[in-house]
């Protein structure tokens, strides 16, 4: 039973990583973090929301890292998108946004990704970590990067 419970949580957390649902997930999370009771140690929903946020931050924060690291991960991220676009073309489907290697500008895609995904996500993450940690995190990111 513990295995099944763990498996259910992991599947839920992975499904919450879908970028097509990102805006809804962030809206839900922003509503949660404005509550004075959040996070409640007794709330399974609060714990899962925090877990999902941590996974998203780990997955999507690469543009906030030092340039050499960011460039490496951006290249891998773009290749993943382009492979999806290549497959969509092979299957005769319309190509998803940013997935056409012939039409996508890496710099524009990266800037859009930072504006739409990374900044709101890391902003929410910093709120969760609390004011006492905010200045230390900002200093580390600004001075040292996330390397």
Image (spheres, rainbow, N blue to C red):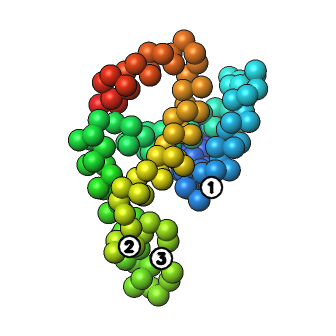
Left or right of 78 in this view: 132:
right
Distance Cα–Cα, label 1 vs label 3: 18 Å
Report which residue position mark 3 lands on: 95
Q: Residue at the spot x=54%, y=49% of the render?
A: 116
Report which residue position mark 2 lands on: 103
Left or right of 52 in this view: 25:
right
Left or right of 3 in this view: 71:
left
Distance Cα–Cα, label 2 vs label 3: 11 Å
- Disc with the residue nearer the chain's start (1 vs 3): 1
Q: How many other residues sit within 10 Å of disc 1, few (<14), some (14-19) or many (≥20)?
A: few
Distance Cα–Cα, label 2 vs label 1: 24 Å
Q: Residue at the spot x=69%, y=43% of the render?
A: 27
Residue 57, position in %: x, y? 48, 38
Question: Mark 1 and 3 residues: CB-CB less than 8 Å, in contact?
Answer: no
Q: Residue at the spot x=46%, y=46% of the render?
A: 114
Nearest to viewer (mark 1 / mark 3): 3
- Image quadrant where residue 67 sits: top left
Nearest to viewer (mark 2 / mark 3): 2
**Residue 44 in view of the camera:** no
Q: Compared to 135, does 55 lie above or below?
A: below
Secondary structure at badge 2 equals loop
Residue 119, position in %: x, y? 51, 39
Report which residue position mark 1 lands on: 21
């Amino acid at each position: 039973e513990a295995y099944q419970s763990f498996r259910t949580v992991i599947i839920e957390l992975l499904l919450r990583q879908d970028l097509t649902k990102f805006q809804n997930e962030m809206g839900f999370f922003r509503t949660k973090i404005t509550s004075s009771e959040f996070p409640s140690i007794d709330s399974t929903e609060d714990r899962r929301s925090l877990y999902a946020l941590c996974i998203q931050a780990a997955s999507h924060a690469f543009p906030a890292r030092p340039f050499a690291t960011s460039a490496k991960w951006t290249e891998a991220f773009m290749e993943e998108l382009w492979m999806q676009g290549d497959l969509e073309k092979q299957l005769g489907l319309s190509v998803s946004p940013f997935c056409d290697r012939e039409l996508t500008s890496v710099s524009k895609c990266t800037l859009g990704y930072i504006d739409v995904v990374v900044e709101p996500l890391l902003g929410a993450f910093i709120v969760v970590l609390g004011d006492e940690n905010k200045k230390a995190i900002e200093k580390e990111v600004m001075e040292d990067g996330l390397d």
